[in-house]
Image (cartoon, helix red, strand yellow):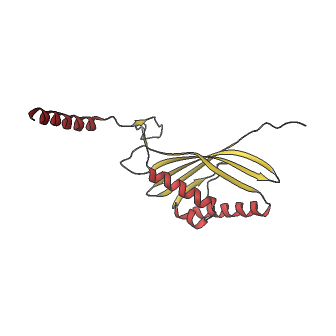
Amino acid sequence: MKYLKQILSIFTVSIFIFSCNSPERSVGMTAWEGVEDMKWHIGTKSAVDIAKAMDAAWQSRNYDEMRTYISDTATVTASNGYTFESVDAFIERRKLNDSVWDSNGSTFEWSFTNLFSVDLDPSTGGEHVHADYFGTYTEEGKADNFRVMNRYYIIDGKIVMWNSYFQDIIEETSEE
């Protein structure tokens, strides 16, 4: 019995020491002024869930719900470099695009290819969520495939910065 107590004591102390000395999971670098010495950490599921919910609201054209995921003071920059003067202007542009596409019978569809969150300082809040998509725009029977990467900066459950990047997929066509 004496040895069993010693073994359990050593095991308990070992677990405690190991848990306190486990390496921190961080990697990478940034050149952003003032945080050059920081490394990236894995983000949280809650930030990823905000991006998923935003995407679901957009796909279902629920503009009021979309608005709930974006901060009133958010900066939204489109893939062409245009920065919207307000979140309302961004939402109105989405409505206009959907209206035009509906009127000419075109479709605009997309789905996630990957989605993840990283964070420079988990102790302060705010996460960088990367959402990559594959999409297809179809008009008059012709499909144009593309990739989009949206980068969201999310603080307290709201998107405060949204940058979008676009890549057209050039596909070979047969010459007849």
Residue depicted at 56% across the width and 52% down the height: 162
Indicate the position of residue 56 as horizontal and vertical percent values: 58, 58
Figure quadrant of residue 16: top left
Residue depicted at 63% across the width and 58% down the height: 59
146 left or right of 69 in image: right
Please tell me whether residue 151 is drawn above or below residue 14 in the rendered image.
below
Residue 86 seen by the camera: no
Indicate the position of residue 104 as horizontal and vertical percent values: 80, 61
Indicate the position of residue 115 as horizontal and vertical percent values: 54, 46
| Quarter of the figure that contains the N terminus | top left
| Quarter of the figure that contains the C terminus | top right
40 left or right of 6 in image: right
Indicate the position of residue 114 as horizontal and vertical percent values: 56, 44
Figure quadrant of residue 103: bottom right
Figure quadrant of residue 19: top left
131 left or right of 144 in image: left
The residue at the far left in this view is: 2
Please tell me whether residue 23 is drawn above or below residue 42 in the rendered image.
above
Please tell me whether residue 87 is drawn above or below residue 40 in the rendered image.
below
Please tell me whether residue 66 is drawn above or below residue 176 in the rendered image.
below
Residue 28 or 48: which is nearer the viewer?
A: 48
146 left or right of 39 in image: right
The residue at the far right in this view is: 176
Residue 162 or 24: which is nearer the viewer?
A: 24
The residue at the far front in this view is: 1
